[in-house]
Image (spheres, rainbow, N blue to C red):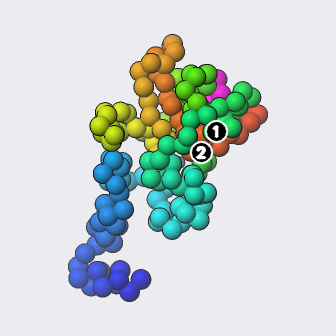
Amino acid sequence: MLNRRHFALAGISAAALAAAARLAIAGPSEKTAATTFEVTKSEEEWKKLLTSEQYYVLRKHGTERAGTSPLNHEKRKGTFACAGGDLPLFSSDTKYESGTGWPSFYRPLANAVGTSTDKSFFMSRTEVHCRRCGGHLGHVFEDGPQPTGLRYCMNGLALKFIPGSAGGPA
Ligand SMILES: [Zn+2]
């Protein structure tokens, strides 16, 4: 906290300091880092809240190994919420078997996710993140089923399944 006071004395606002810290943390593929999200936590806070695997996916844009998520086989009615908070992201009504080894959906819930362009690994992909906390969820591709033609390819580690509910608005 001593550092923060020094910066404040030097005339640098806390907001500028936070922005600088985010930039320092952000890797080259983290296009969402500069956006301000409703829920913001320090790296240390996220590490306490999440398992190391969840942290790797949500906060470091990691990808879980295909076929490893128990949510691949989740067929019950319910809602898939962000593992970094509780924002409902997908309804079981829009989940389908894509054969990729990752939980796949053809449409997110309203006002649940945001997207950005991800140019890592010499590809241009559309990255999908939680609208509330900015946590990385996966990518969206244009080879999904109707009615949207979209495939939201999600990391199961980024989601938590809440069974029983109707699944939210379609
Ligand atoms: Zn979230």
Q: Residue at x 37, y 33 (%)?
A: 126
Q: Is residue 132 visible?
A: no
Front of the two marks 1 and 2: 1
Q: Residue furthest right?
A: 164
Q: Tell me residue 14's x, y (percent).
A: 33, 72
Query: Which mark is first along the chain, 2 or 1?
Result: 1
Q: Tell me residue 170's x, y (percent).
A: 59, 24
Q: Which residues are magenta?
A: 90-94
Q: Residue at x 36, y 62 (%)?
A: 25
For the residues labelled 1 and 2, say whether their Cβ atoms are less than 8 Å apart.
Answer: yes
Q: Residue at x 41, y 83 (%)?
A: 1
In the displayed structure, 51 sits above or below 112; it is below
Q: Is residue 48 visible?
A: yes
Label 1 – label 2 distance at C-alpha: 7 Å
Q: What kind of residue is marked 1? A: Ser
Q: In the image, which disc is placed on residue 69?
A: 1
Q: Picture quarter containing residue 167?
A: top right
Q: Nearer the viewer, residue 123 or 134?
A: 123
Q: Residue at x 57, y 52 (%)?
A: 54
> Is 120 on the left-hand or right-hand side of 144?
left
